[in-house]
Image: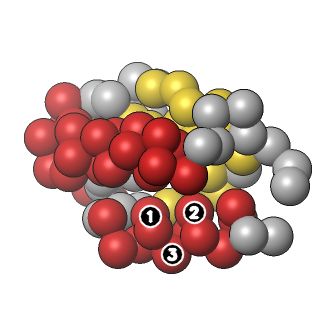
Amino acid sequence: MSKINITVCMGSSCFARGNAANLEFIENYIMQNGLDAQIDLAGSRCDGSCVTGPNVVINGTQYTEVDEDKLKEILDSLSQA
Ligand code: FES
């Protein structure tokens, strides 16, 4: 499996609108699936696209209005690839 890069927007808008919970979900997902070595998790500042937030970038693709269901779907498909 190739490395997965995840950047979670930690700006106040995204954070308040769901990325606080999304970050926790990702951390748990990594732990439960033993993906520590495969997933690089980082935070970023607001890039001005708050209106579509919460925003998460995964392997260079920006995902908008991210929730736990969406994250699970993306992470499942990437970690099984
Ligand atoms: S707070 Fe995330 S884009 Fe502005």
**Which label was assigned to residue 13?**
none
Image height of 27 relative to 81, above or below: above
Q: Is residue 32 above or below residue 11?
A: below
Q: Amino acid at mark 1?
A: Leu
How far apart, in angstroms, are the residues tagged by discs 2 and 1?
6 Å
Q: In this orientation, does residue 5 appear?
A: no
**Dot 2 alpha-carbon crowd within 10 angstroms: few under 14, some 14 to 19, many 20 or more:** some
For badge 3, the amino acid type reads Glu
Residue under numbered circle 1:
71
Disc 2 residue type (three-letter): Leu
CB atoms of marks 2 and 1 within 8 Å: yes
Instruction: Locate the N terminus and report the quarter of the image it occupies.
Output: bottom right
Residue visible at 32% across and 29% down in the picture: 10
Q: Give the number of the disc on residue 75.
A: 2
Separation of residues labelled 3 and 2 (CA atoms): 6 Å
Q: Kindly identify the residue that appears in the image at 56 percent across and 52 percent down.
A: 33
Relative depth, front residue between 17 and 31: 31
Is there CB contact under 8 Å for labels 3 and 1? yes
Q: Badges 3 and 2: C-beta atoms under 8 Å apart?
A: yes
Q: Residue furthest right?
A: 2
Looking at the rendered structure, the secondary structure element under dot 2 is helix
Q: Position of residue 55 (x, y in %)?
A: 40, 51
Residue at point 60%, 43% (across, down)? 34
Q: Is residue 25 visible?
A: yes
Q: Residue furthest left?
A: 16
Q: Position of residue 72 (x, y in %)?
A: 45, 68
Q: Quadrant of residue 23?
A: top left
Q: Is residue 81 above or below residue 29?
A: below
Disc 1 is placed on an element classified as: helix
Residue beneath disc 3? 73
Q: What secondary structure is marked by label 3?
A: helix
